[in-house]
Image (cartoon, helix red, strand yellow):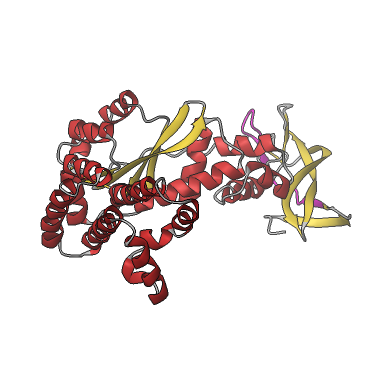
Amino acid sequence: MNLEDVFIKKVVHADHYVRIFIETNPTIQTCPHCGAQTKRIHDYRYQEFKDLPFQMKYTFLVLKKRRYVCTCGKRFTEKYPFLPTYQRRTLRLSYKIIDLLRNLVSIKSVAETMNVSVSTVTRLLDTVNYTTPSLPECLSIDEFKGNTDTGKYQCILTDAKKHRILDILPDRTQSHLSSYFRNIKRAERHRVKFFICDMWMPYVDLARAYLPNATIIIDKYHFIRYVTWAIENVRKRLQKTMPTGLRKYYKRSRKLILTRYKKLREENKKACDLMLLYNDDLRKAHYLKEWFYAICQNEKYSYQRTSFWDWVKTAEKSGIPEFEECAKTYRNWSEGILNAFKYKYTNGPTEGYNNKIKVLKRISFGVRNFKRFRTRIIHCSI
């Protein structure tokens, strides 16, 4: 049984459960009222409580508990290290439930596995508490759709170097974010050297106000997709002028245009070349897309910086409205984009946690209580 000073008197096996009758040897007890020691037994009582499943069956322990009586007249029950006071489950069962909550499973699933109620698992989850760690050198921020009682969107803060969650914030409004960072000591905020975010101006304003020593980096994924959107919009615009059969072909074969040309097989390269011959705008858009992807994949910052500005100027003069708009966006966010090329930090770890949060939310059919949701997210990530 792996329980201290416990011996088994009888075991009863059923189809779905095991009932084990256990006892302990009498020992000298200290009276909780007067502090005197006594060995005098008043009576016995049986108590049934739950333990860890055994042989894929629910396990019930039936303990023959002693009640002692002191010379002062106080009657009290013997204490057991494996059974908390006023509980109907062993301590190790509670620890196991909390440990199972680290997995991406629903609370109901944990309750059914451990033979306890959903409310019991919820109460145990509420006993877990995670404080906010100090800000790291490289801070990353992003939002996710949590749909909790605090709002539709929540914020996640991560350490981009150590790939760990720092905190989950109840909403992404600028007022709440300002209040959160205002309560952090100034010396701690000034230690942040890099701040990674997407192309949302409130995040940048927040960093400039509360993290003055941080270099602002725009996440690579968020600015690269503007080129993808641009060439997709060019294709969609041209499809409207095509005959029905050709329009369907271009729609089905859009991946030939989106995929890096050098990664295509020979037969696909020929098909892509034929698609690009249809229109000058599409051919020029494909060239700009390939050029920008090559800039992003280059390892030399000096080349990336020079080529980035050459690309922006070329796109602005391309005569393609979609890429002119993309170049305008890049010019406005050029500082953060160039910092992404220079320092190579991304929001990749944060996006990974966001995906994990989506899985957790889906298997739980949503979690409305923000405090419980925050605890579960951090608990699953450590």
| Position in image of residue 259 (x %, y %) | 37, 62
| Position in image of residue 78 (x %, y %) | 71, 40
Q: Nearer the viewer, residue 121 or 67?
A: 121
Q: Residue furthest top?
A: 175
Asked whether the viewer can see residue 177, the reply is yes
Q: Is residue 43 above or below residue 248?
A: above
Number of disc labels: 0
- Identity of the residue drawn at 80% across and 52% down: 22
Residue 349 included in the magenta stretch of the image: no
Q: Nearer the viewer, residue 140 or 89?
A: 140
Residue 25 included in the magenta stretch of the image: yes
Q: Residue furthest front?
A: 243
Kindly indicate the quadrant of the structure image that contains residue 266. bottom left
Q: Residue furthest bottom?
A: 266
- Identity of the residue drawn at 58% across and 43% down: 362
Q: Is residue 88 above or below residue 280?
A: above
| Position in image of residue 271 (x %, y %) | 40, 68
- Identity of the residue drawn at 15% across and 40% down: 213
Give the magenta range: 20-36
Q: Is residue 20 left or right of residue 278?
A: right
Q: Is residue 25 left or right of residue 126?
A: right
Q: Is residue 184 left or right of residue 120?
A: left
Kindly indicate the quadrant of the structure image that contains residue 54. bottom right
Asked whether the viewer can see residue 85, the reply is no
Q: Is residue 207 above or below residue 22?
A: above
Q: Quadrant of the N terminus?
A: bottom right
| Position in image of residue 360 (x %, y %) | 55, 45
Q: Nearer the viewer, residue 370 or 173?
A: 173
